[in-house]
Amino acid sequence: MNKIIYNILTLLIVTSLQSQTKKKKDINSIKEMCGCFEVRFDFAETFINNDDEDYKPSKNYSTTALEWAQIIEENKDIISIQHILISGTNEKPYIIKHWRQDWLYQNTEFYIYYHDNKWNYVKKDKNQVKGQWTQKVFQVDDSPRYEGSGSWVYVDGKSYWENTTSAPLPRREYSKRSDYNTTIRGNRVEVTKTGWIHDQNNSKVIRKEGKEDRILAYEKGYNSYVKVNDSKCTSAAKWWVENKVKWNYVRNKWTQVFNKNKTLSLKKLVDNKPLYRTLFSKDINQKNQIDSTIESYINKL
């Protein structure tokens, strides 16, 4: 009897140690996405899934950027990475707050995008996300974008994480396209010797209440992040030091909103301006201003 108990305890200890070792490896992979990167964004519409002779696919899209990514919050189960774009010249850099990604270990609470600026709150069982990491992606104004859960995989010398989830239209599309309202994103984040890659297999979807999704077309996305010396991004790091208090207020307000654990619907415009443009104003700095601004974009359901 004692031998059986001993064997069970030994197995539990070994399993726990293996889980902790895997988690540390995952954390190291996530942190590889931090630093200064030369980025190239490439997107191409590949297959058309309709018979409309007048259908016009999106043109191929390609652009480059210099981007700084740094950890702004970290504890044992969360890593928050803020991305900041740098344009202009070394003498006169122009800084743009870009997207943010939060990585949560064994997270069970999600805001899953539905359609037309609405996110449904979803609670998963802990067994569904055991050993997994959720990537939560936020807009430049820290409002939600998309999120999903998956396991980091280490095989054949590769380190990657994959998930498929729904998302709003990307900025390069929503100002030009109105014939679909949801993107189903197949995301693959892979750490490489030179940086990391965001590989995407996306579907452009028409989603309506009570009806099955209709795929309009498919899209391939390939974003490569090549790490360069951090000295190229000092202007972005400095900008964050000077502006982090304001954006802490913004994130804290959104956290309050998310903690309500209910469906979230956002207005696209208030006073004919999107939220990011209002929050980017240098006149909006105080907590009460930020709180009231964000509240003004939330639809009452």
Image (spheres, helix red, strand yellow):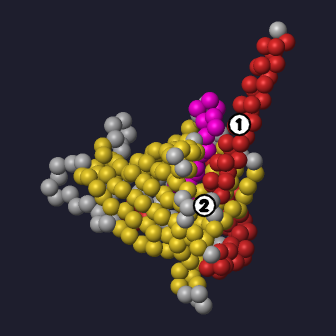
* Callout 2 secondary element: loop
- Tell which of 170 and 148 is nearer to you: 148
**Image quadrant where residue 263 sits:** top right
Quadrant in the picture for the N terminus = top right
Query: Mark 2 vs mark 1: which is more N-terminal?
Result: 1
Let me know if residue 133 is in the magenta part.
yes
User: What residue do we see at 67% from left, 54% from top?
Assistant: 28
The residue carrying pointer 2 sits among few (fewer than 14), some (14 to 19) or many (20 or more) residues within 10 Å by Cα, namely: many
Is any atom of residue 50 visible in this view?
yes
Amino acid marked by disc 1: Gln
Q: CA distance from mark 2 to mark 1?
A: 24 Å
Relative to residue 223, is residue 243 depicted above or below? below
Name the spot of residue 209 as percent of width and height, x first.
38, 40
Q: Which residues are magenta?
A: 126-145
Q: Which mark is residue 76?
A: none
| Residue identified by numbered label 2 | 33
Is 301 or 188 nearer to us in this picture?
188
Going by the numbered disc 2, the residue's amino acid type is Met
Q: Is residue 151 left or right of residue 223?
A: right
Q: Residue furthest right?
A: 2
Toward the left, the furthest residue is: 53
List x then y, in percent, for residue 188.
Answer: 48, 51
Give the left or right position of residue 20, taking residue 264 as reference.
right
Indicate left or right for 131 with 8 as reference.
left
Q: Residue at x 72, y 76 (%)?
A: 242
**Residue 227 at x, y percent in the picture:** 57, 69
**Residue farthest along the front direction in this orientation:** 156
Give the residue at mark 1.
Answer: 18
For the point 38% across and 51% down, which residue is it?
A: 202
